[in-house]
Amino acid sequence: MTGVRRAYLKTGLALVLGATRTDRLIQLMSGTRRLPLVVGYHRVVDDGRSLRASIIAPMLVSRRMFERQLDWMGRRFRFVSLDQLGAQLESGGAFRTPTATITFDDGYRDMYEHAYPVLKRKGIPAAVFVVTDWIDRATPLYHDRLYLLLTRDWSAAREVLVELGVMTAERALTSRTFSEPFGALRFLLTTLCQEELARVLAALEERLSIDTDRLDGLKPLTWAMLAEMQRGGITVGSHTRTHALLTRESPSRMLEETIGARQALEERLGVPIDHFAYPDGAFNTETVEAVARAGYRFAYTTCHHRDRRHPLLTIPRCVLWENSCLDPGGRFSAAVASCVTSGIFHFASGCRHRHAVTRESDVSLVRR
Ligand SMILES: [Zn+2]
Ligand SMILES: [Zn+2]
């Protein structure tokens, strides 16, 4: 299905559901009505920047659209902090009024530069889940570095991936996954563990160089910015030490990533760190157990279903970006926003994540 056709269908469905109030019925059926809305953002950028072909587009929202989405939510929901939300979920008390909370993943510097001033001006509480080893560092996160390398020279990058054994030469030519850099990026991130990704990065960096102009905007928060925001009412949570997808890592690495990040934050910020967000929303029974052992009280996914044994460690989230709430004409649509935030599209299409416990992958890197 093409993007445009999908957008038309989405808007059509949104309008029909909105008109017939079926959305309320579906919310009731899926059980999400009792849950608050937890929104996940990544990067908030300058208005002009998002319009240009930019880095990993689904991670971006312009400041203008960010405000638009906040204003729409503000009319429908009561904003609470993550701590207030957690306390209410823990007590088992019902959410009598529609409740929402705003979160950011990764800890990009533009959250401080563009989102924090807007939130402060509007008096909206929010939270940020940071990758602790990345704070104060000069090099971008590995998924950004990978994407910059893959898009630098896609055919040369593809050759490197074939040489490494990530894919066969035949697959490189025939598979849709490898027809463009973003598909390859998703494949690498969801298939390989951190150690293997580091090997792929090193091999790509040996052959290709990153265009330094494109590094602009890929900087992390500093500890000073984080402390300032925390004093200003932003809740700080953890997003692992290195942005490892826990479902791809060994049990010992899982603990290192989760406990290590919590300890680093508690040491630097002097407060208990209770909240955790799974990188890429990737979780399974093993990772949920690891997060529980690491001492977190609340953890957030990007799914709309929960683990019955650990409901507080699988709190659903709705990820929003620039185009999330647009109609096919590119205009903000309240009907689409309503469907997106209520999870109806997810309910209709089911979960796309794989939640089975398996670390085996169909890829074996040559230089093991
Ligand atoms: Zn992330
Ligand atoms: Zn899921």
Image: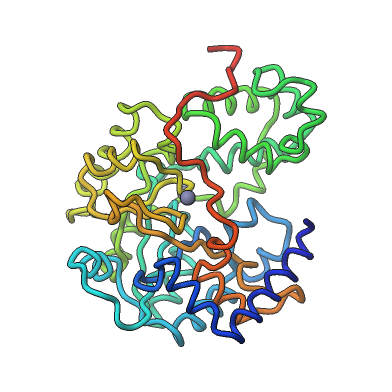
Q: How is the image coloured?
A: rainbow
In the picture as drawn, the residue positioned furthest to the top comes out as: 367
Q: Is residue 53 left or right of residue 82?
A: right
- The image shows a total of numbered marks equal to 0
- Nearest the viewer among 92 and 159 is 92
Figure check: 159 above or below 325: above
Figure check: 252 above or below 87: above
Figure check: 313 above or below 205: below
Q: Residue at x 68, y 70 (%)?
A: 10
The answer to which image quadrant residue 80 occupies is bottom left
- Nearest the viewer among 326 and 150 is 326
- Nearest the viewer among 286 and 38 is 286
The answer to which image quadrant residue 8 occupies is bottom right
Q: Residue at x 60, y 69 (%)?
A: 62
Q: Residue at x 54, y 73 (%)?
A: 66
* Residue 187: image location, x then y, percent: 62, 36
* Residue 333: image location, x then y, percent: 64, 80
* Residue 74: image location, x then y, percent: 44, 83
In the picture as drawn, the residue positioned furthest to the right comes out as: 173
The answer to which image quadrant residue 51 occupies is bottom right
**Quadrant (top left/top right/bottom left/bottom right) for the N terminus:** bottom right
Q: Residue at x 20, y 63 (%)?
A: 90
* Residue 350: image location, x then y, percent: 55, 55
